[in-house]
Amino acid sequence: MDTQTLTKLAKLIRYFILVSTTAAGSGHATSSLSAVELMTMLYFKYLHYDLLHPDNPANDRVIFSKGHASPLFYALYAAAGRLSQEDLLQYRTFGSNLEGHPTSRFLFTEAATGSLGQGLSVGVGEALAFQARISNFKFQISNLQHVYVLLGDGEMAEGEVWEALAWAAHRRLTNLTAVIDVNRLGQSGETMYGHDTEVYRRKLEAFGWGAIVIDGHDFSEIDAAYQKALDYKAGPVAIIAKTVKGRGVSFLEDKNGWHGKALSKEELAKALVELGEVDKKIRGIIAGAEVASSNARVLRSSAIASAPSAQGSHLPKLPALTYDPQNPVATRKAFGNALVRLAQAYPNMVVLDGDVQNSTYTELFAKQFPNRFFECFIAEQNMVGVALGLSRRGWSPWVSTFACFLTRAFDQIRMSAISGATIRFNGSHAGVSIGQDGPSQMGLEDIALFRSVHGSTVLYPADPFATERLVEEMMQRSGISYIRTTRPETPVLYTKDDQFPIGGSRVFDTVSPVMTVVAAGITIHEALKAQKQLRQELISIRVIDCYCVKPIDTATLKKAASETKAIIVVEDHYPEGGLGEAVKSALFSTLDTGNQTIKPDQLIHLAVSKMPRSGKPEELLDFEGIGAKDIMETIKNFLKKG
Amino acid sequence: MDTQTLTKLAKLIRYFILVSTTAAGSGHATSSLSAVELMTMLYFKYLHYDLLHPDNPANDRVIFSKGHASPLFYALYAAAGRLSQEDLLQYRTFGSNLEGHPTSRFLFTEAATGSLGQGLSVGVGEALAFQARISNFKFQISNLQHVYVLLGDGEMAEGEVWEALAWAAHRRLTNLTAVIDVNRLGQSGETMYGHDTEVYRRKLEAFGWGAIVIDGHDFSEIDAAYQKALDYKAGPVAIIAKTVKGRGVSFLEDKNGWHGKALSKEELAKALVELGEVDKKIRGIIAGAEVASSNARVLRSSAIASAPSAQGSHLPKLPALTYDPQNPVATRKAFGNALVRLAQAYPNMVVLDGDVQNSTYTELFAKQFPNRFFECFIAEQNMVGVALGLSRRGWSPWVSTFACFLTRAFDQIRMSAISGATIRFNGSHAGVSIGQDGPSQMGLEDIALFRSVHGSTVLYPADPFATERLVEEMMQRSGISYIRTTRPETPVLYTKDDQFPIGGSRVFDTVSPVMTVVAAGITIHEALKAQKQLRQELISIRVIDCYCVKPIDTATLKKAASETKAIIVVEDHYPEGGLGEAVKSALFSTLDTGNQTIKPDQLIHLAVSKMPRSGKPEELLDFEGIGAKDIMETIKNFLKKG
């Protein structure tokens, strides 16, 4: 690809950027214009990508971490002949897949971006997926595929970028190149470093990256940089490109106040005059699979194809499941056991943990499958982004840390849902029942977090059998799913033959129950204690183990509401967004067992309502009024009243 | 303070660490032991702190970002005579303020820590609070107070640390010193860089910090480092201290597997033999206010004392409030106006924004009060931490960005609540009504997030008058409060005389309403459109503007449930944890208007249920079924049935 042709393509791409944003009446024209040369060279000289088969495992990958440069992103595929100008003119309109920021509705989007600072982690995950070292358990994977991530200078302020940079260097991901578009201007003003590219060089080198500073509008410098990046074998490489925001249109260049704005029709006409003659017929060629498919690539392709799918409709043969009914087991430990048990059946399952593997029990998996375990250190945001990248390349990632620390990655979890990704989360040390470590270590908002995620599944088992079965269920489930596990050891309640389908619950009934306690996880054990003690006082209650918080078992809850006088929901979580509100929503549902009447005092909600503190688990359950004692008192008070 | 005395104090502190953790049966003994010399030197030679008056504005500040080193933290105050050994033996027990990780229940805690990587941002906020540059509008503040932050090497993997480092250097906070305890071992294994202190040096220098590498157990090196840090005037300084985890007890030193563990009684006995004779009577002296109070410090002290409190019981005199009832105004703009209007009355009010000031309209404040506005760039986690630090030092911070990007800082918001801090948040661009930018930019989980925060207040105004009044209300409110603002311009609904108390709502009634629509923000306008059109069809409905989502107006909602046939909740948010579930919880409350019966189909919940996409705001409201059309159809269908 000669410079003359590249120059023509760059002009065409600028034309596309300008007309598509003006047609839309919004969009980030100037942020796109700064990276035109960088991306034109990448797409039409360096990238290997089978445009007809985005899923071809031989493809290189490109992530626009600066997702607002979507006009450029789409223009590149138009310049490659894969989109028409008519498609571009639908940019940002309802029904078009060319959205304001890329989502997975557009065929070539690796991961939804637009919340800045997230794309590099995804690229790290994809580069890692391509690396041989994670695959020596079964697959032959070549190291040839390359991952490119386009970043803006503004998003370099995001901590997640530095988490990703550190970890990528630590893993020596030589097949990863970051292209940093240093156009000096953020949305509202100059970035922290303006055009000082040397600051970026110093930082990146200190983080263990190769760093190449170039003029981001000079094709020969860009060309040399990409070549150097491919040749560099000491680690990943960053191309730090000094660019001009709005490049190519004099009244936009390096000007504040144009971020996220489209030109008016009059301004567009002026800009097009400046742009000069555009060859609207020219199209670039992206080197496709025929070039990319070396033997190694074909090999990987077939290996992936033969790998069992995590989304399969029936569960593969698994080792037997045994727990001694006499020995209490923490559900966090059962979770670790389940990972090990499922590992053989799901060879594409990988596990990520944030320096708490000996608390979450992912260490059990790590010991047996060291090549499928990734220590992500204390950097939860990058951990989730890496998982997203791995999931996009055919792996089935589990992300594990304390429930409370998953709040650190809420934005990344949200973006994973927008990306349509399947990622499974474990949050251990849920609730006040962790005890002495105090409130900073207690997950008390995690159910609210995961319930609010679009299309999510939220599980909270009370015993080791339930935990193991729910981990199995999660492997069959797509989208974002979450299992909440408990620190203390708790009694075994079930057997290996019990089933725990998604959307179900388990009922511990007694004869003619007068009231129902709905609980999950640790509070089930409190409810069962209450049930036992009340029986001695001849008060019979039903206990529902609501192990599936989303989707919830509406039918069983409504049945309980009609068959017993009241429902008490008890949860080790703040009152908002947790099990209690899930139950309330279920009772207001008109689905399932119809439309019976409820009185407000028929639903009593016990939850963590005081700021917790250090103490023994049982002291804290009492302090918050969610232990057996409070359940019994609540029931007796209700019965006394009415 | 001579080395011999420091050595004796260090020995005493090691003794305290060991006995308190063994008494507790848990706690991070080894992580404490590595930093004993570092902190002993700091507390007993460099720190200026009036131990009897933690609020003395002349005090220096120390933050244990590695909050798990709480045994050391408390031991220091015992060695200074402020706690007794008996106090220490209550460590981690229920009722003791010496919790597993420091919370604000302990008098000398600047901010709750324990979620790693957050302390430096808080320190940045405190150092900033001390800097003269933010105070030239009214106060005289000296630049003498110094802020020290103790970090672990494990938490250096957290992106927030690098956000804080970059921003601190950018602001040239020469009164800030980070002490990095490089003890090589994380919880579950070696950190990314082990004992390679040079990597840290390179990184910190690249980030604009002075960096001093020392042996963290050598008093003379430590002494020199603190002195250099005080003398260095080019920026903040990091002391990178190579240390040994478990230092002082041979069988703990540099050993994996001891993280977060206390010694058994037998192990303690062995350890104490190794420690040798301890002078249990010796106490160190921390230079107090009599030393610290230079004239400048006294000046600041009195300035702060005379500053009006944001927690005052009555509102100061404010400029008048006017909006033309004919001109639609975006609530985000009214929010910006409100900040400006309140700024004079609250001279301690400061505003932080993450490079979106021209979208959130904090630019209105920034232009008029540049010294009270902090551009935090695209680094939301650090922004919240800085706000927490500012709030601890007497300022009233507002944090502002897009609603969706506040998910980035959920962990920091959670920790702010544990710190008992008062911080006010604005999340603009809420919901699908932002339109073309697409789902990555839409706040759809933000109400769930903020409702789940302990003690929070959640507000969602529908018009500029309501917005202005609610901003006023927030200034009177302590704890974490949140206002959700809308991108598009919407009609003016209220007048300057309307009141919007916390816990209230506004009712738009018609004669004999048959049904009630509960909405907030953008959906109020849809509900009012529906009300108007239905009136032409002789269907009369009530519309409740539920501007206060938490605490919610239970009485008005229950009244509506009893006076009309059904309630329809319409919200521009995902179904879980938002307005709908808040209303359901209110209807299940037995407070207020008693205990009337509800049927499930009397509560219909319309919320964002499909993954949104780009499009016009009105197209998206329709797509999600939360626009006027859907409200009308829902009402008509209900009436047809019944």
Image (spheres, coloured by chain):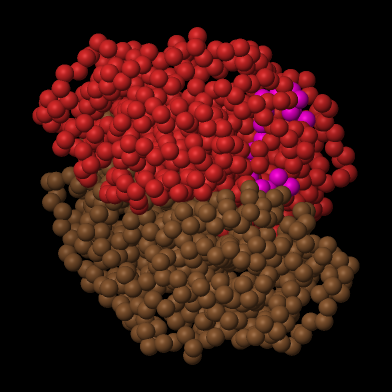
Chain colours: A red, B brown
Q: Is residue A336 visible?
A: no
Q: Decide which of A229, A96 is in the foreground and name it.
A: A229
Q: Is residue B503 above or below residue B85?
A: above
Q: Is residue A353 magenta?
A: yes
Residue at image position (22%, 59%) is: B367
Q: Is residue B127 above or below residue B277?
A: above
Coordinates of residue A304 in the picture (x, y in percent) = 63, 17
The correct choice, above or below, for B446 with respect to B271 in the image is above
Q: Position of residue B18 (x, y in %)?
A: 77, 70
Q: Residue at x 48, y 31 (%)?
A: A229
User: Relative to residue A15, is residue B48 drawn left or right?
Assistant: right
Residue A301 belongs to magenta span: no
- Most foreground residue, A46 or B172: A46
Residue B370, quarter of picture:
bottom left
Q: Position of residue A501 (x, y in %)?
A: 68, 28
Q: Residue at x 38, y 88 (%)?
A: B295
Give the position of the N terminus of chain A as an image quadrant: top left
Does residue A424 appear left or right of residue B206 in this picture? right
Pick the front one: A362 or A622: A362
Q: Closest to the observer: B520 or B175?
A: B175
Residue A271 seen from this side: yes
| Point 31% across, 13% down: residue | A283
Where is residue A433 shown, x and y percent of the image? Answer: 69, 55
Q: Quadrant of residue B271?
A: bottom right
Segment colored magenta: A341-360
